[in-house]
Amino acid sequence: MANRKHNRVDGKGRIVIPVKIREAMGIETGTVIEFDYMARRHQLVIRSVAEPESHAQ
């Protein structure tokens, strides 16, 4: 799925994930999101996760 979308960061540092991408990724209200910043490539990878690792049992 190649969906390239552009959004602006608001004054509180928030971004909006477009509906089609949220649906494709199964992201809904309450979904935990993991951010992985790849400094060398200046890329931000976003993944939905079942639960944060710090709370996993």
Image (cartoon, rainbow, N blue to C red):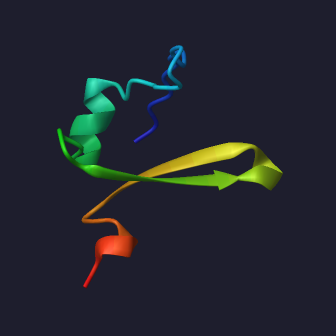
Q: Is residue 7 left or right of residue 27?
A: right
Picture mark count? 0
Image position, residue 2 (x, y; %): 46, 37
Q: Residue furthest right?
A: 40
The residue at 38%/73% (across/down) is: 54
In the image shown, does 7 or 13 lie closer to the viewer? Answer: 13
Q: Is residue 48 left or right of residue 12?
A: left
Decide: is 39 above or below 19: below
Decide: is 39 above or below 49: above
Image position, residue 53 (x, y; %): 38, 73
Decide: is 44 above or below 10: below
Image position, residue 48 (x, y; %): 33, 54
Q: Is residue 47 left or right of residue 26?
A: right
The residue at 64%/52% (across/down) is: 37
The residue at 30%/73% (across/down) is: 55
Q: Quadrant of the C terminus?
A: bottom left
Q: Residue furthest bottom?
A: 57
Q: Quadrant of the N terminus?
A: top left
In the image shown, does 23 or 55 lie closer to the viewer? Answer: 55
Image position, residue 36 (x, y; %): 57, 55
The residue at 37%/29% (across/down) is: 17
